Each structure stands twice: as structure tokens, then as C-alpha cells.
Image (cartoon, helix red, strand yellow):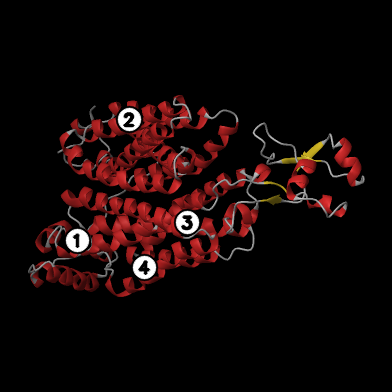
């Protein structure tokens, strides 16, 4: 019996077939930023004040200026208060004009948006004042969908294969993404977004598995980072889409419908030959391997293929094994925190793209553009600096920048935005590093279990990221302080991890030289 890795070396570890596969995986990665970050463009804050049309029941001959002066308190700058109005009364208009109204109440009949010509999610569902927190809560519910999707589609992908799982999750993402554009109320919109989040997690898991099972071990970081760069390009395209389409329903449909163009994946997306072998589908695996060899212009002998057989399964570890031995417990807790910090800070900064003082569309464009060189640099830095130092450096840089942002006065939006861009770029590079580092630092028998646990930690960070933003109402510096402190602690903890550069992967849980600090 021959190992699958030996056959992969014969047909090519990163030939035309694998490059074509990476390109196919890049396309969904290019489309997914819309679902992750698109909502920030349709819930941008706009001027608003209480609907006070009640006064027209008393007098219909008032100008708009008179209506506002009589029914809404004014701020020191002369603009109307956004969330309170004078208490409606039944007196005659002359008495109101002469004596005014002394008591105030919260808005009772909705709000008026004088400068918003096209409906946004905020204006249509009134996500202002007491309902403003629903925006961040809905983003957390979307992130909860990612956690549920990881729990559902991870095992499903193992059962039906990465190819079918990708096709299924793309269908779900497109269908419910477009459906959200027709949502009759905000709660239906949230439910549909939750399902989109679940499908996003399924796509991520299946695409990562499919690429890693076809690409040689030495090329996996390259393939991973290329797909991450395509995600950055999608973030740049998102800025252009949001700038072009201001009606939130058309924006939602335009960002979701392109997924249906990937129906051709049914014919061109290969299944994992490695997965087919593990399922005993040897003839199907041989057929896919012959196709890969042909595209790579390599020859693979039938004698070699005839030796394919399901490998004898090694007993896998379980989640308890990660906490029984001190060195594994240390690895697990530190890497779980690193994943948590990556997700919390990356999404926390990304979802507040409109809060840094400059044009939101330009900021989003720069946010995406700067990720490409920083993620690409990981290909070289991981080999030059090593995994541990690289991981620590990105987290510490991101943490320090987040801590500096609250210290910069709002009168300097350019400086604040530059710092935010640096912080997001650092966390993006940290995310790419984490995927590579985590796959190397855990032993083979518990690798999938440990990565699943770390991924769940990241999902928790994603869920909390929008909720941390709600703390801004207590003090503007709290969210960035928490983001910065979390990343900084993660960077410091990285120095207690082993270095895995140019070292063989560990197969068992026994402590060895590779597990030493």
C-alpha cells in the first residue's frame, strides 16, 4: 500500500491542477466580504429627529421651521434633538406658541430622516435611538451563525465530501442572502443573515479542507495566503459596490446574487481524492488523480494507482487529551486565546470602519488594499522570522495601535484612520499566520480536534466583537482599549509557544524537542 502523499508527489504538489483549484477557491473568497462587512454601509448614521406630525392636528398652517421649534428641543448648535420631543398636548396653537411646552418624552411616532433620499436598513427599520443597539446585536447573531455553521457543516463535510458541501453552502448563501433583500421586517432580516453566516462557515471549512488535501505540504501556506488575498480584493470591491448602490435592498441583492454564477462548479470543482480513498471509493479517487496528473502534464502509472487503499486509521485523540498533559494544555490555552484575539480585534476594527472620521468608502478601500501586501509578506516572514516571533509581532503591533487610537483627538481623523488601517492589516496578517502556526504546533492525533476548538474560540471572539462596540456609550475609549489589550496579551503569550519553523510535525502527544519552548 502506498501513501497518498507519495502519489501527490508523482502527479505534482502544486501544478496547473492545484493552481486552477486555488483560483476556483479564490472566487467565493472574493464574494464573502459582502456578507461579513456589507451591513456597515446600510446602517450608516444619518440626521434624524422625532416625527411630530401630531401638531398638524392642532394647526395645519405651520412651516417646517415652526413645527421643529414648537415640538422638538434644540441642541446648542441649533440642530434638533434626535431622540426626544416635547410632550404632545391638546392646547390651541396660540397657547403653545406663547408658553411653549416644558416636558419632553422619547419619540412616539417614529422618526424623520430629512437628508436620506433612498431607504437604508437604518431608515427603513428605524435603527436609531433606543433601537440603535439592534445593529450591533444583529451582527453578533450573524457571527453566531458562523459558530453554528462550523458545528453543523464541519461533520457534514466529512460525511458528504468538500465538493458537495461547498456546492450546498454556496446555494444556501446565495438564496438566503438574496432573500434578506426582501425581508419585510428587521427580525426576518436577522434570521436570514444568521443562515447566511452558517453557510459562510461551511464554505470556509470545506474550501480549506479541499485545498489542503490537494496541495503539497510545503505549498499549503502559499495556497492559504493567496485565498486570503482574494478576500482582501473582495473588501476593496465592496467599497465600490456600496458607493454605487445606496438602496439597501438592491445592495443586498447585488452582493448576494453573484454566488449563483458559480453553478459551473458542479462540473469543474474536483472532489478530494484523499477523502475518496478514506471512504473506500478507490475507483473514483483514481479517476480524479488521472485527471490531475493529465492537467499537470505528469504521468502516473496504473501500477502505482493500484496500490491505493484506505490507510489504517490511527486512533485519534479527543478534547480531553489536550488538557491532560501540561505542555498540550499550555499550547491549547494559548492558541485558543490567539484565535480569540485575532477574531475579536479584526472584526471589531472592521465593523467600525465608519467611526474613524474619514470617508467610509475610501477607508474600506484602503482597509482591503493594505491587507494584500501584509498577508503576502507572511510567505517570507514566516520563514525568515519563524512562526512564533511573526505571530507575536503582528499581535503586539495590532494591540499597540488599538491602544493608541483613543489617545488621538477626533480633530485628527487622518491619523486615527492611518492607525486603524495599520491595526487591521496587522490582525489580518496575524490571522494568516495563525492558520499556518496552528496546523504545525499540535500533534497529528489531536490536530483536527485542537483546530476545531481554536476555531470555536475565534467564533466566540467574532460574536463578542460587535457587542464590545456597545460599550462606547459608557466611554469612547473602552472598545479600543479592550481590543488592544486582548491583542497585546495574545502577542506576549506567543513567546511561551514552541517554534515550528523547519521542524517535522509531531504525530503523538508525547513531549519532544519540538514541543520545547
> Mark 3 and mark 1 in contact (Cβ < 8 Å)?
no
The span from disc 1 to disc 4 (Cα, nearest Å) is: 20 Å
Where is mark 4, residue-wise?
164
Above or below residue 204? Residue 444 is above
> Mark 4 and mark 1 in contact (Cβ < 8 Å)?
no
Q: Nearer the viewer, residue 64 or 250?
A: 64
> Mark 1 and mark 2 in contact (Cβ < 8 Å)?
no
Where is mark 1, residue-wise?
19
Query: What residue is at 30 percent from the left and 43 percent from the top?
Result: 370
Above or below residue 261? Residue 409 is above
Where is mark 2, residue-wise?
397
2 or 4: mark nearer the eye: 2
Task: Give the percent coordinates (x, y) of residue 353.
Answer: 45, 43
The span from disc 2 to disc 4 (Cα, nearest Å) is: 40 Å
Q: Nearer the viewer, residue 407 or 362?
A: 362
Query: What residue is at 10 percent from the left and 72 percent from the top?
Result: 302
Where is mark 3, residue-wise?
198
Q: Secondary structure at mark 1?
A: helix
The span from disc 3 to disc 2 (Cα, nearest Å) is: 31 Å
1 or 3: mark nearer the eye: 1
> Mark 2 and mark 3 in contact (Cβ < 8 Å)?
no
Task: Give the percent coordinates (x, y) of residue 387.
Answer: 23, 36
Counting residues from the start of the chain, the first of labels 2 and 4 encountered is: 4
Q: Secondary structure at mark 2?
A: helix
Residue 274 visible from this viewpoint: no
The span from disc 2 to disc 1 (Cα, nearest Å) is: 33 Å
Residue 365 visible from this viewpoint: yes
Q: How many marks?
A: 4
Amino acid at each position: 500500500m502506498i501513501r497518498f502523499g507519495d502519489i501527490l508527489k508523482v502527479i505534482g504538489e502544486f501544478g496547473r491542477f492545484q493552481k486552477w483549484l486555488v483560483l476556483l477557491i479564490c472566487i467565493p473568497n472574493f464574494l464573502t466580504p459582502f456578507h461579513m462587512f456589507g451591513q456597515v454601509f446600510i446602517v450608516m448614521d444619518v440626521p434624524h429627529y422625532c416625527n411630530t406630525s401630531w401638531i398638524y392636528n392642532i394647526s395645519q398652517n405651520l412651516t417646517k421651521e415652526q413645527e421643529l421649534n414648537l415640538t422638538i428641543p434644540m441642541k446648542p448648535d441649533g440642530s434638533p434633538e434626535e431622540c426626544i420631543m416635547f410632550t404632545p398636548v391638546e392646547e390651541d396653537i396660540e397657547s403653545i406658541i406663547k408658553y411653549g411646552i416644558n416636558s419632553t418624552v422619547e419619540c412616539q411616532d417614529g422618526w424623520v430622516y430629512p437628508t436620506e433620499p433612498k431607504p437604508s436598513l437604518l431608515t427603513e427599520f428605524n435603527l436609531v435611538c433606543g433601537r440603535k443597539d439592534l445593529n450591533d446585536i444583529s451582527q453578533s447573531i450573524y457571527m453566531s451563525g458562523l459558530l453554528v455553521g462550523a458545528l453543523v457543516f464541519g461533520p457534514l463535510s466529512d460525511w458528504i465530501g468538500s465538493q458537495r458541501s461547498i456546492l450546498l453552502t454556496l446555494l444556501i448563501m446565495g438564496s438566503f442572502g438574496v432573500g434578506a433583500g426582501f425581508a419585510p421586517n428587521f427580525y426576518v432580516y436577522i434570521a436570514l443573515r444568521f443562515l447566511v453566516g452558517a453557510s459562510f462557515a461551511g464554505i470556509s471549512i470545506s474550501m480549506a479542507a479541499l485545498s489542503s488535501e490537494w496541495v503539497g505540504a510545503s505549498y499549503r501556506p502559499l495556497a492559504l495566503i493567496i485565498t486570503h488575498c482574494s478576500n482582501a480584493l473582495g473588501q476593496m470591491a465592496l467599497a465600490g459596490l456600496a458607493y454605487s448602490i445606496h438602496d439597501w435592498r438592491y445592495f443586498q441583492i447585488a452582493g448576494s446574487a453573484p454566488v449563483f454564477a458559480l453553478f459551473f462548479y458542479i462540473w469543474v470543482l474536483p472532489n478530494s481524492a484523499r477523502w475518496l480513498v478514506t471512504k473506500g471509493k478507490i475507483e473514483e479517487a483514481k479517476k480524479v488523480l488521472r485527471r490531475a496528473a493529465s492537467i499537470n502534464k505528469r504521468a502516473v502509472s496504473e501500477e502505482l494507482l493500484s496500490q491505493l487503499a484506505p490507510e489504517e486509521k490511527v486512533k485519534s485523540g479527543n478534547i480531553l487529551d489536550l488538557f491532560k498533559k501540561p505542555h498540550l494544555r499550555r499550547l491549547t490555552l494559548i492558541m485558543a486565546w490567539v484565535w480569540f484575539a485575532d477574531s475579536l480585534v479584526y472584526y471589531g476594527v472592521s465593523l467600525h470602519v465608519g467611526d474613524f472620521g474619514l470617508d467610509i468608502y475610501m477607508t474600506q478601500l484602503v482597509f482591503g488594499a493594505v491587507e494584500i501586501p501584509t498577508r503576502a509578506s507572511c510567505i517570507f516572514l514566516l520563514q525568515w522570522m519563524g512562526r512564533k516571533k511573526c505571530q507575536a509581532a503582528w499581535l503586539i503591533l495590532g494591540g499597540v495601535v488599538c491602544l493608541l487610537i483613543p489617545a488621538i483627538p477626533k480633530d485628527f481623523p487622518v491619523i486615527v484612520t492611518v492607525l486603524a488601517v495599520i491595526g487591521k492589516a496587522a490582525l489580518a496578517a496575524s490571522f494568516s499566520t495563525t492558520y499556518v502556526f496552528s496546523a504545525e504546533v499540535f500533534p497529528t492525533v489531536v490536530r483536527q480536534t485542537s483546530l476545531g476548538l481554536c476555531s470555536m474560540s475565534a467564533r466566540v471572539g467574532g460574536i463578542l466583537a460587535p457587542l464590545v462596540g456597545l460599550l462606547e456609550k459608557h466611554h469612547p475609549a473602552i472598545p479600543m482599549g479592550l481590543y488592544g489589550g486582548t491583542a497585546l496579551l495574545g502577542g506576549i503569550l506567543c513567546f511561551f509557544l514552541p517554534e515550528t519553523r523547519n521542524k517535522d510535525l509531531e504525530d503523538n502527544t508525547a513531549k519532544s524537542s519540538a514541543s520545547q519552548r
